[in-house]
Image (tube, helix red, strand yellow):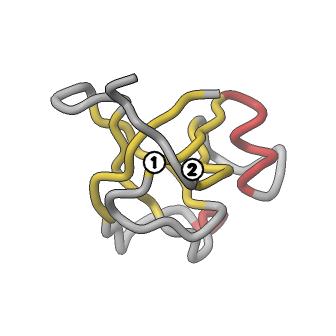
Amino acid sequence: MRIMRVEKTLVSTNRIDSFGHRPLLVVQDKPGGTRSVAVDAVGCVPGDWVICVGSSAAREAAGSKDFPSDLTIVGIIDSWNPEG
């Protein structure tokens, strides 16, 4: 699991059918870090600190072992101070 911050919504009108209408969000593990795309399974908004899972856990969290995701948001963190 990884702690990441939601940066913004990713709008993609062309996608494979198995994605359905699940939201895609741009996330970062630290400011200025590498951006990743995550499937939102819990209903996040930009600015939220979230818990993400990858690999086969990401596919199951998104809804199915056949789901084409390698990063899925599974929780919203209520309180988090990234500075320590």
Q: Quadrant of residue 82?
A: top left
Q: Quadrant of residue 17?
A: bottom right
Q: Amino acid at mark 1?
A: Trp
**Quadrant into which the N terminus falls:** top right
Considering only vertical position in the picture, is 32 above or below 19?
above
Residue at the farthest left position:
32
Rate crowding at label 2 as few (under 14), some (14 to 19) or many (20 or more) other CA atoms within 10 Å: few
Image marks 2 and 1: residues in contact by CB distance under 8 Å: yes
Q: Is residue 80 left or right of residue 8?
A: right
Please give the name of the residue rendered at 57% of the width and 50% of the height, measured from the top-left corner: 77
Depth check: 21 or 53 in front? 53
> Which secondary structure, mark 2?
loop
Q: Which residue is mark 1?
A: 49
Q: How far apart, in angstroms, are the residues tagged by discs 2 and 1?
A: 5 Å
Please give the name of the residue rendered at 71% of the width and 55% of the height, measured from the top-left corner: 62
Please give the name of the residue rendered at 56% of the width and 28% of the height, measured from the top-left corner: 2
Q: Which residue is mark 2?
A: 77
Residue 68 screen position, x and y as percent: 63, 46
Q: Amino acid at mark 2?
A: Ile
Rate crowding at label 1 as few (under 14), some (14 to 19) or many (20 or more) other CA atoms within 10 Å: many
Q: Is residue 62 left or right of residue 78?
A: right
The tag on residue 17 is none
